[in-house]
């Protein structure tokens, strides 16, 4: 036996928590409408964390596997944050005029 | 574990006197197990980045056309999306229990749990197919025949592009997962897995749970908008 054996009780507890989260996120959406988006994302993050730690056994995994998980989240953040920075800041400045137009005006 | 492997070695007359489940390039079963686990996680990093690109596109369009997402929120089928989320989480539970059964050497339970996981995975794809046909009948397929009776049809079309690209790639992963599960089922029925060697069950489980996590994010992004 190489890995940690998770008891059935733990699996069922995590499953119950995931179910409650799913019901909660639908409930919030039906009552608050589209404004509940931030809540929905927060609940999804909690659910993903539970799956990663318990169903994927990362809590009991080797330190290298843990590092791989953290690395994937880090690179995903770099991708999403840098792409968002570019698109959000585009409207800050008026579009640069093509150089041909400058020449005609002068 | 050592007792078992010695017996097997004796029966097969293995020249090297080591655990028959451990490949020659590994020191021991533990190292083999951890290497396989790490290898799968490295593959999953590439998968995170693959889906990450589409999540990035989603973030950009949501920032550009926030209204379109609000208009389109009437076209999503929340009950079906929620039902599929439940189905997929149940399949993740049975997958986790399959890994546990293989760790404890419960052969019958392992086969049952793999079959249940495949059943719930198939139900998910069935519901998905129904949703796609529903979208088709409403004319919500992006392209020249796109039909939208509300506001912001052009921008809403982009959202449907994202919807089909993201759920479509997720469904492809589910189909691939079912293929791997079929192989796992056959090898499990042949009795290939034991508490000494269950790496393929664990690694297939990692893949299956990853696909579940992708859906955990797709559900709020594409249904609860």
Image (cartoon, rainbow, N blue to C red):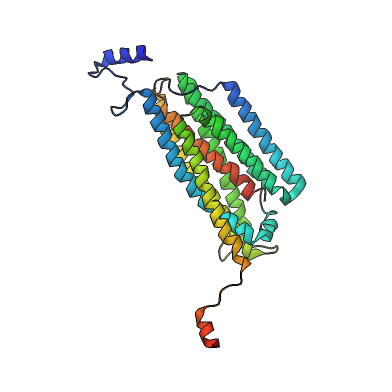
Instruction: Name the foreground residue: A83 vs B199.
Output: A83
Q: How many marks?
A: 0
Q: State the image coordinates of residue A55 (x, y, percent, origin top left).
A: 54, 30
Image: A49 above or below B108: below
Instruction: Name the foreground residue: B186 vs B39.
Output: B39
Q: Is residue B64 visible?
A: yes
Instruction: Name the foreground residue: B34 vs B23.
Output: B34
Q: State the image coordinates of residue A40 (x, y, percent, origin top left).
A: 67, 44
Image: B47 above or below B192: below
- Left of B29 or right of it: where is A53? right
Image quadrant occupied by the N terminus of chain B: top left
Q: Is residue B168 visible?
A: no
> Which residue is farthest left?
B15
> Which residue is farthest right?
A31
Identify which residue is drawn at 56% across, 53% down: A81
Q: State the image coordinates of residue B161 (x, y, percent, origin top left).
A: 56, 57
Instruction: Name the foreground residue: B28 vs B120.
Output: B28
Identify which residue is drawn at 72% across, 45% down: A29
Image: B90 above or below B137: above
Identify which residue is drawn at 69% across, 44% down: A39
Image: A74 above or below B195: below
Q: State the image coordinates of residue B60 (x, y, percent, origin top left).
A: 59, 58
On the image, which quarter does residue B89 sit in? top right
């Amino acid at each position: 036996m190489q890995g940690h054996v998770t008891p059935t009780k733990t699996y069922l507890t995590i499953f119950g928590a995931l179910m409650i989260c799913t019901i909660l996120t639908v409930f919030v959406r039906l009552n608050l409408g589209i404004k509940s988006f931030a809540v929905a994302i927060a609940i999804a993050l909690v659910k993903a964390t539970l799956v990663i730690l318990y169903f994927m056994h990362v809590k009991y995994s080797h330190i290298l596997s843990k590092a791989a998980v953290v690395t994937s989240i880090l690179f995903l953040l770099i991708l999403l944050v840098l792409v968002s920075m570019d698109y959000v800041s585009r409207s800050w400045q008026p579009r640069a005029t093509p150089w041909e137009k400058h020449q005609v005006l002068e | 574990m050592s007792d078992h492997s010695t017996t097997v070695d004796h029966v097969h007359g293995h020249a090297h006197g080591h655990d028959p489940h451990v490949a020659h390039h590994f020191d021991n079963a533990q190292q083999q197990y951890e290497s396989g686990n790490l290898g799968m996680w490295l593959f999953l990093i590439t998968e995170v980045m693959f889906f990450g690109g589409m999540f990035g596109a989603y973030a950009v369009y949501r920032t550009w056309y926030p209204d379109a997402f609000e208009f389109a929120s009437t076209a999503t089928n929340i009950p079906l999306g929620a039902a599929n989320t439940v189905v997929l989480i149940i399949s993740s539970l049975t997958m986790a229990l399959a890994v546990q059964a293989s760790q404890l050497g419960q052969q019958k339970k392992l086969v049952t749990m793999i079959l249940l996981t495949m059943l719930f995975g198939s139900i998910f794809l069935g519901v998905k197919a129904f949703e796609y046909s529903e979208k088709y009948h409403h004319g919500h397929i992006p392209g020249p025949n796109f039909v939208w009776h509300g506001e912001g049809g052009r921008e809403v079309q982009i959202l449907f592009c994202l919807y089909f690209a993201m759920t479509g790639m997720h469904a492809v992963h589910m189909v691939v997962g079912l293929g791997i599960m079929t192989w796992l089922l056959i090898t499990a029925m042949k009795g290939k897995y034991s508490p000494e060697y269950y790496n393929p069950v664990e690694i297939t489980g990692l893949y299956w749970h990853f696909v579940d996590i992708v859906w955990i994010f797709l559900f709020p992004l594409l249904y609860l908008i």
